[in-house]
């Protein structure tokens, strides 16, 4: 099994009395960000090594625990050993480390004890030798923690663990130059705020289906950092998306379908931003509502376009699109998704140019056929799934 050991014992440089790990970091705290990276790498157990328990830290532990897996707080190596499985491989994250998921994933795949090192040109990094400093990340066997636990309690846990690993012959892997800008040790609130918004925004998963991945996701990623930096409420973009969708239906009803579709596109961007903010901030209910709202917006717009174009044929085509799209969203399990599959954003992309040239019924027909074809592919993929 893979476990994570996160050190959060030092106070912030510019906020005495506040643990650096509990400082804000892109809408989260630094410790929550570190725990997410470890969980994404496969860690099923998170252990926080703390110097003292604070109200902020208690809140952090509760939020990490709600994401699933096990989370514990310890003060000594002896307590950590009591929590760890003897055969566990342990991902170590030093106090104040800011890094990327790619670096953590690469380290987690190592088959033996490994220390990530960098050039010794920054006093925040502990030296391993005259020519190398520890970058604050390591993958070690549980017995290394046990060796530290057998030593006197007044030894510094983090520094002693580093020395034990180095003396045991852990492989030293130098931080790649490409990854170096993504990695640092920060204990300043201002520095973490600067790094946090863009770093956490990069954690938002890239959608699989083409329309969301290449059209919607880049706009969401562009908007997230300034919104998180200004602590904008998650409900704000959701409310804006709702207002825009009402405006879209009203514009279509007033025989301005192109304006309505453009407003609907803006509504999709807005609710997608709300979904991303909800995911980052652990506001799962808002994130779920925002995710389902995308399908609802497109369904309402399609029905409005169809009815205004032809109350009988248009409504029938729009209804077929809505039914196919709804069934597809239920059948499209994450493991089965393919890049070319239809999605709510894709339907809007198809509708807009055809409505612009005055062919709304053709647009609805093409979108419905696309949705039906994708649904058939999804059902076949599900049947062939072992």
Image (cartoon, rainbow, N blue to C red):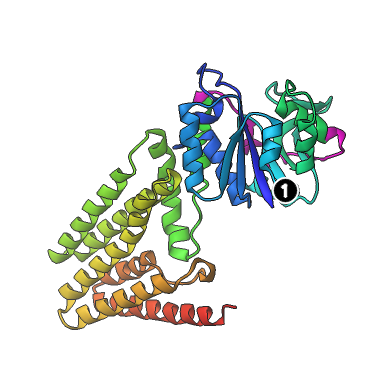
List x then y, in percent, for residue 315: 20, 78
Q: Residue at x 71, y 33 (%)?
A: 78
Of residues 153 and 226, the one nearer the viewer is 153
From the viewer's perspective, tell me whether residue 214 is left or right of residue 152.
left
Q: In the rendered view, tell whether residue 261 sits above or below residue 28.
A: below
Based on the displayed image, in which of its 4 quarters is residue 323 positioned? bottom left
Q: Residue at x 54, y 40 (%)?
A: 33
| Quarter that holds the C terminus | bottom right
Q: How many marks?
A: 1
From the viewer's perspective, tell me whether residue 56 is left or right of residue 187.
left
From the viewer's perspective, tell me whether residue 373 is left or right of residue 2.
left
Reading the image, the residue beneath label 1 is 88
List x then y, in percent, for residue 13: 56, 18
At mark 1, the secondary structure is loop
For the question of whether residue 24 can be seen, the reply is: no
Of residues 73 and 282, the one nearer the viewer is 73
Of residues 70 and 244, the one nearer the viewer is 70
Q: Residue at x 43, y 49 (%)?
A: 279
Q: Which residues are magenta?
A: 166-190
Q: Residue at x 54, y 24 (%)?
A: 19
Based on the displayed image, in which of its 4 quarters is residue 174 positioned? top right
For the question of whether residue 262 can be seen, the reply is: yes
From the viewer's perspective, tell me whether residue 118 is left or right of residue 279.
right
List x then y, in percent, for residue 31: 55, 35
Q: In the rendered view, tell whether residue 150 sits above or below residue 265.
A: above
List x then y, in percent, for residue 189: 50, 24
């Amino acid at each position: 099994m893979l476990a994570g050991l996160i050190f959060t014992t030092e106070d912030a440089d510019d906020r005495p009395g506040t643990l650096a790990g509990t400082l804000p970091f892109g809408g989260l705290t630094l410790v929550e960000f570190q725990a997410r990276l470890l969980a994404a790498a496969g860690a099923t157990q998170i252990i926080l090594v703390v110097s003292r328990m604070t109200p902020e830290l208690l809140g952090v532990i509760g939020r990490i625990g709600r994401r699933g897996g096990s989370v514990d707080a310890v003060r000594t190596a002896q307590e950590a050993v009591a929590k760890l499985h003897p055969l566990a491989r342990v991902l170590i994250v030093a106090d104040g480390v800011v890094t990327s998921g790619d670096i953590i994933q690469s380290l987690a795949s190592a088959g033996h004890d490994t220390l990530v090192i960098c050039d010794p040109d920054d006093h925040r990094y502990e030296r391993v030798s005259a020519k190398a400093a520890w970058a604050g990340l390591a993958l070690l066997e549980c017995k290394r923690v046990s060796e530290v636990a057998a030593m006197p309690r007044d030894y510094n846990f983090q520094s002693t663990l580093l020395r034990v690993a180095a003396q045991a012959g852990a492989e030293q892997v130098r931080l790649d130059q490409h990854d170096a800008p993504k990695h640092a040790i920060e204990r300043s609130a201002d520095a973490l705020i600067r790094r946090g918004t863009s770093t956490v925004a990069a954690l938002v998963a890239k959608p699989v289906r083409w329309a969301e991945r290449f059209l919607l996701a880049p706009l969401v990623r562009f908007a997230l950092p300034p919104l998180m930096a200004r602590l904008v409420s998650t409900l704000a973009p959701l409310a804006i998306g709702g207002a825009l969708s009402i405006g879209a239906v009203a514009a279509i009803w007033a025989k301005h379908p192109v304006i309505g579709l453009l407003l609907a596109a803006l509504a999709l961007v807005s609710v997608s931003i709300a979904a991303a903010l909800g995911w980052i901030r652990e506001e799962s209910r808002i994130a779920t509502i925002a995710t389902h709202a995308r399908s609802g917006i497109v369904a309402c717009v399609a029905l409005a376009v169809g009815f205004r174009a032809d109350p009988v044929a248009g409504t029938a085509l729009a209804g077929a699109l809505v039914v196919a799209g709804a069934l597809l969203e239920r059948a499209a399990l994450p493991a089965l998704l393919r890049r070319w599959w239809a999605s709510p954003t894709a339907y809007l992309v198809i509708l807009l140019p055809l409505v612009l040239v005055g062919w709304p019924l053709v647009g609805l027909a093409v979108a419905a056929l696309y949705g039906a074809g994708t649904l058939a592919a999804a059902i076949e993929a599900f049947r062939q799934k072992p």
